Amino acid sequence: MASKASLSRKASKPAPVVPPIVSIIMGSKSDWDTMQAASEMLTEFGVAHENRVVSAHRTPELMAELASGAEGRGIEVIIAGAGGAAHLPGMTAAYTTIPVLGVPIESRELKGLDSLLSIVQMPAGIPVATLAIGTAGAKNAALLAVAILANKRRPLREKLKAFREQQKRKVLEEPLP
């Protein structure tokens, strides 16, 4: 016979799974050190997102499939981080009309300048919004994604305004040495 305590407990329901609306993709696992900043920023804003390793060179079929099927899966913005030749953002943009935000990953050889130039020099007709090299670019890509999504989501717009106000307060309250 079950005890009174076990009978009075309600079965807990699993939290609902919210489908992602932002896809964070990167060329290799080593890019996670940079792209994690985008994921953390989206989490801070409560934006459902996914994180995937997708290589334009080693898994081109997967890249094409994810990019061309993104809209059908409910993805509204793609953040693509890549280093070196950095073809992932541009090739992804070629397979979708969803906004693609490119994050140049800092490389050993050229400190990310190679990545930056590869992403920013897209030919006319296939745009990729290119952010700063490294972690700052990853954070700003997430904030730009939030701004894009906030156009149709008032609560998200209010969170973004509060974030900006917090940034302002940090600067104004910073004591000088």
Image (cartoon, grey):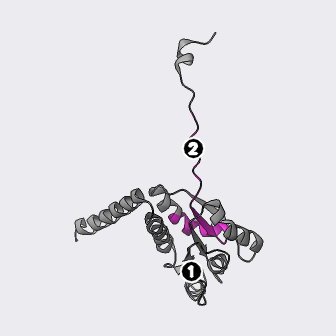
Can you identify the residue that label 2 sits on?
16
Q: Amino acid at mark 1?
A: Val
Is 31 magenta? The answer is yes
Residue at 58% from the left image edge and 86% from the top image edge: 110
Is 145 magenta? The answer is no
Residue at 55% from the left image edge and 69% from the top image edge: 34
175 left or right of 134 in image: left
64 left or right of 145 in image: right
Closer-to-camera residue (110/44):
44
Query: What SS does tag 1 mark?
Result: loop
Q: Amino acid at mark 2?
A: Pro
Q: Locate residue 53, reporting x and y percent.
A: 67, 66
Picture layout, residue 89 above or below residue 76: below
Label total for image:
2
Q: Locate residue 131, reporting x and y percent.
A: 50, 78
Mark closest to the chain's N terminus, 2 or 1 = 2
Q: Which of the 4 image quadrants contains residue 117?
A: bottom right
Q: Locate residue 16, reporting x and y percent.
A: 57, 43
Residue at 28% from the left image edge and 67% from the top image edge: 168
Chain part drawn in magenta: 13-38
Quadrant location of the N terminus?
Answer: top right
Crowd tier of the residue under label 2, counting other residues whose Cα lies within 10 Å: few below 14, some 14–19, many 20 or above: few
Query: What SS does tag 2 mark?
Result: loop
Can you identify the residue that label 1 sits on?
128
